[in-house]
């Protein structure tokens, strides 16, 4: 699936109705913490507030750092890697 198709799919999903938030979670991942890869059940938005990491969503890497937002679609394999203590 190409990136333009994914962006259009996201746009169409959020353009056609109300956006509802079911839960808000704040969590911290330590630099030496190991997190097993997992498959997401629903979509999520991630807003890093400190530190840095590489988040891989279905084999596509994104840099997570303060000031960025990462959209995580449902049913993707999610992995965290290369965590850094300081931004």
Image (cartoon, helix red, strand yellow):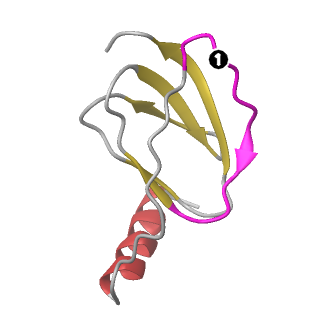
Q: Residue at x 38, y 19 (%)?
A: 51
Q: In which quadrant of the rendered view does residue 45 lie?
A: bottom left
Q: Is residue 3 above or below residue 11?
A: above
The answer to whether residue 48 is magenta is no
Which residue does the numbered mark 1 point to in the structure image?
33
Image x and y of residue 59, in percent: 65, 40
Image x and y of residue 50, in percent: 33, 24
Left or right, 28 with reference to 80: left
The answer to whether residue 41 is magenta is yes
Image x and y of residue 67, in percent: 24, 35
Q: Secondary structure at mark 1?
A: loop
State the predominant SS element of the stretch in magenta. Answer: loop
Q: Is residue 47 above or below residue 7?
A: above
Left or right, 47 with reference to 34: left
Q: Is residue 28 above or below residue 41?
A: above
Q: How many marks?
A: 1
Q: Residue furthest left?
A: 67
Q: In which quadrant of the rendered view does residue 14 lie?
A: bottom left
Left or right, 5 with reference to 79: left
Q: Is residue 38 above or below residue 7?
A: above
Q: Quadrant of the N terminus?
A: bottom right
Q: Quadrant of the C terminus?
A: top left
Q: Residues within 10 Å of mark 1 (few under 14, many from 20)?
A: few
The span picked out in magenta is: 30-43
Left or right, 68 with reference to 41: left
Q: Residue at x 46, y 68 (%)?
A: 5
Q: Residue at x 49, y 28 (%)?
A: 28
């Amino acid at each position: 699936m190409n990136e333009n198709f994914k962006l259009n799919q996201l746009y169409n999903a959020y353009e056609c109705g109300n956006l509802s938030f079911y839960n808000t979670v704040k969590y911290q991942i330590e630099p030496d913490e190991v997190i097993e890869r997992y498959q997401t059940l629903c979509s999520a938005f991630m807003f890093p507030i400190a530190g840095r990491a590489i988040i891989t969503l279905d084999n596509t890497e994104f840099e997570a750092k303060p000031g960025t937002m990462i959209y995580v679609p449902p049913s993707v394999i999610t992995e965290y890697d290369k965590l850094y203590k300081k931004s």
